Amino acid sequence: MAPSLFSLFQIKSIILKNRIVVSPMCQYSAEDGFANDWHMVHLGARAIGGAALIMQEATAVSPEGRISPGDLGIWSDEHMEKYKQITTFILQQNAFPGIQLAHAGRKASVSAPWQGNRKLVPEEGGWRTVAPSPLPYHDNEALLPLEMDREAISKVIDDFREAARRARESGYKVLEIHGAHGYLLHQFLSPLCNKRTDEYGGSFENRIRLLLEVIDAVHLEWPGDLPLFVRISGTDWAEGGWNVDESVELAKILKENGVDVIDCSSGGAVSHQKIPVGPNYQVPIAERVKTEAHICTAAVGLITEAQQAEDIIKEGKADLVFFAREALRDPNIALTFAHELHADVIWPKQYERAELKD
């Protein structure tokens, strides 16, 4: 019997050849939001390596929505030329190209990890960040984020809509809205970041409002027969923060609003979080959301071994497994796992002579 990890999975009009997804991972290698050959080779190599779905890194819907000056962007039609090359190549490898649309909010304007991952001020090429409330992520930040007014909120919604159009026209087949890791949409969800007293703050219904409005806007441009994912932080891992109970309720509402998969991560909202990191530490979130909200889920986080991923799918804890650092360590992760699990998969013709055999 074929391993569950290598079973087909249909989401709307696309059929994934296995349950392995390359997670969106920032490369901090763009200039003015433009992709280059690094992104082409990075994403293309993982498509050659056998994963069914290749998710492009958090791609900013506006310049101020970038995490760092090196982030990819999709706020201009001019960004699309390289993206079309990337999506075309991925599709040629019998894989699907996906894109994660994002706005970093108060966690924007930081340097790349190898440059210290520190807040950049305007004199260093940084910019003033925006947020639901004027609260910094770190207490020692020189500039507080600007509290968003209704005009700023409307702009974000429009930016996501236009980004979805460009994603569609660029050839992406899966779109994911980034509502996790303490970035803007998560900032609105979490009562630790959102202290607003208007219709976007306070109650659960108010805190989820912006995410739902973004999804409504995206539906205007994203084809109804292509999958829509939302990445959430299932819990803030901090007292008084967003929690798994709220994630389950949100997932039920997202399903009613045309979302197909909940990509279940966690944390990132506040710097004082206490995350019990370990193998499979976020899998129970994916399992609970899947079971209680009756929606497909993806598991992510310290999943590094073939049998570990196989068990998650076989035991019904999630429908997909996202790989981040393990996919950096091994671009051919799906081919490697297929060998370990004795799955019969098709290798690229150019690589067949190197196929692993027992």
Image (spheres, rainbow, N blue to C red):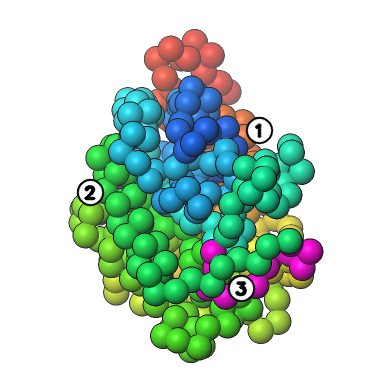
Residue 171 position in % (x across, y down): 28, 37
Q: Which mark is residue 329?
A: 1
**Which numbered mark, 3 or 2, is in the foreground of this view?**
3
User: Residue 355's x, y, as percent?
Assistant: 52, 18
Front residue (pair 196, 211): 196
Side of 265 where 63 appears, left or right: left
How far is the residue under mark 2 from the one under mark 1? 31 Å
CB-based contact (under 8 Å), mark 3 and mark 1: no
Say whether residue 140 is magenta: yes
Residue 274 point in image, percent of width and height: 76, 69
Of tags 3 and 1, which is closer to the observer? 3
Q: Secondary structure at mark 2?
A: loop
Q: Amino acid at mark 1?
A: Arg
Q: Which residue is mark 2?
A: 13
Magenta stretch holds residue 39? no
- The amino acid pointed to by label 3 is Pro
In this view, the residue in front, 93 or 145, is: 145
Separation of marks 3 and 2 at Cα, in angstroms = 42 Å
On residue 134, which mark appears? 3
Mark 1 element type: helix
Sequence-wise first label, 3 or 1: 3
Q: Is residue 11 visible?
A: no
Residue 32 on image: x %, y %? 49, 36
Assess disc 3: are there few (<14), some (14-19) or many (≥20) residues with their C-alpha within 10 Å of its C-alpha.
some
- What element does badge 3 sit on? loop
| Rendered position, 121 above or below 353 | below
- Alpha carbon distance from label 3 to label 1: 38 Å
